[in-house]
Amino acid sequence: MKAKANKGACAHCGKEYTKSGMAKHLEQCLIDKLQTTQGKTGPCFHLQVADRFSSAYWLHLQADANTTLKSLDAFLRKIWLECCGHMSVFHIGPHQLGMGRKLASILEPGMELDYEYDMGDTTALRITVMGEYPGVLTPKKPVTVLARNLPPAVLCDACGKKPAVMICPECNYEGEGWLCKGCAKKHECGDEDYFLPVVNSPRAGVCGYTG
């Protein structure tokens, strides 16, 4: 799979930036939003979440400092990962973190922690704490998207001309098997019912993930 680093759109103003450019943009955009939005405010973390092995997939998130790692886990599963109810874990170095712990008891600006979903076909993420700030709180949504990468354009591995729309799970283990509609019909591993869709997630093509 040849997905490359891609821009994303700010959820507040719609402007597009790269992952690092978005981090700088949000420093001011979050302040501007706070000044123009009414509602209860409280301590929040600005988190950058990225696939550890691909620059194509990334998120910038606002997380209520008083929510738990379990809530962050549930959010990551819903937006990027959940396929078969696999196990997941947060850890800092070799130290595993309990899912019931509040973010405020663990995180501080500049810190990095790792997250893994599925201990077999693992999707590994790196979470960086970009900052802490007073954010507008939404009790039913303790974690919200500040920005997300736009879907990366990936050309078909077979013809190299048309956009890939389907993935052969077997070939994907070798870093190939991203296919356009026409090449998928001729692919030797099976019929189209066997393939997985191309989705905007680092879990694309893995296990039974369909987005």
Image (cartoon, helix red, strand yellow):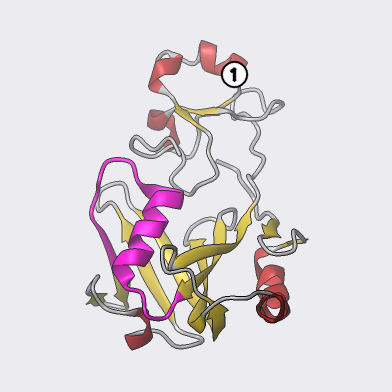
Specify the amino acid type for callout 1: Lys
Instruction: Give SS at disc 1.
Output: helix
x then y, percent, for residue 39: 57, 76
Estimate the x, y position of residue 151 in percent, counting from the top left: 63, 45
Question: Can see residue 168?
Answer: yes
Relative height, residue 73 to residue 23 (above, below): above
Is residue 132 visible in the rendered structure shown here?
Answer: no
8 with respect to 41 (left or right): right
Tell me the residue at 49%/79% (across/down). Answer: 45
Left or right of 204? Residue 121 is: left
Number of marks? 1
Relative to the observer, which residue lies in front, 56 or 42? 42
State the quadrant of the N terminus.
Answer: top right
Q: Which residues are magenta?
A: 64-89
Q: Is residue 44 left or right of residue 107?
A: right
Quarter of the C terminus within the rendering:
top left
The residue wearing badge 1 is 181
Residue 96 to residue 108: above or below:
above
Image x and y of residue 15, in percent: 77, 61
* Residue 159 x/y as whole percent: 65, 23
Q: From what the image shows, is residue 209 above or below residue 25?
A: above
Pick whichever, 190 or 127, lies toward us.
127
Residue at x 55% of width, y 44% of height? 200
For residue 122, side relative to residue 158 (left or right): left
